[in-house]
Amino acid sequence: MIKAVVINDKERLSEFYRLRYDVFVVEQGAAPISFYPDKELKDDFDEKGIHIGCYLNEELVGTISFINKEQHEALMIEKVHHLKSDSSKNYAEAMRFIVVENAKTKKFGVKGLIVNKLLGKLYEVLQQYKIDYVYVQSCESVQKLYESIGFKQIGEYQLYEGISNECPMVLDMTAINQNILEGVK
């Protein structure tokens, strides 16, 4: 059984942060290992974040986080790409999107189900918070996936934190591709 849930439990959050550490620090080398002695990748904004985990039976196989924009605080993507948001609208940033690559997730269609479950739960949460626009920073390898959902590139690719080449993208929640979401309901 594959299900996506908002994670609030301390033990599950720790597992969530360890998976992010394994992917972004160990596998991708996106930050020095010495920054994370507890082997959990937590960002400054995680306290305010909503964290969604996708489970295949009881195994964490996917993650995504979302940060709701505070009135007078810039989101990470706004700082990095020098973006200005319309103050009359509600914005959020989706980040740290992971789908685990292992023997169980390589089975036919499983990855697609994980992606659909994560995006479906994210969509529910964004509606609950009445979000008008969602930002993501995308690398070339996942840009087509984001475009299929309805995201549009709004800036040039640039080196992010000296490690990965990423571009800013935005999704108007009224223009989301409903065909993608049909499989998650």
Image: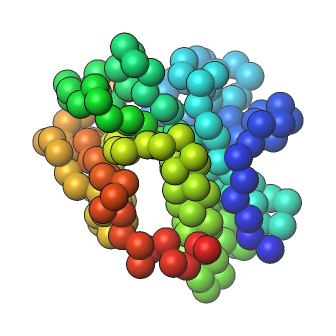
Q: Is residue 97 left or right of residue 178?
A: right
The image quarter in which residue 124 lies: bottom right
Q: Residue shown at 70%/19% (left/top)? A: 37
Q: Quadrant of the C terminus?
A: bottom right
Q: Residue shown at 54%/18% (left/top)? A: 44
Q: Give coordinates of residue 149: x percent, y percent.
A: 36, 65
- Camera-side residue: 170 or 165? 170
Q: Give coordinates of residue 179: x percent, y percent.
A: 41, 78
* Furthest residue in direction top, as rendered: 72
Q: Quadrant of the N terminus?
A: bottom right
Q: Give coordinates of residue 69: x percent, y percent.
A: 43, 27
Asked if 69 appears above or below 172 in the picture, the reply is: above
Q: Residue shown at 61%/85% (left/top)? A: 108
Asked if 63 appears above or below 59 in the picture, the reply is: above
The image quarter in which residue 131 lies: top left
The image quarter in which residue 80 lies: top left
Residue 96 visible in rendering: no
* Furthest residue in direction left, as rendered: 156
Q: Residue shown at 37%/54% (left/top)? A: 173
- Camera-side residue: 162 or 8? 8
Please state the total of marks drawn on the protein image: 0
Residue 152 visible in rendering: yes
Q: Give coordinates of residue 39: x percent, y percent.
A: 70, 28
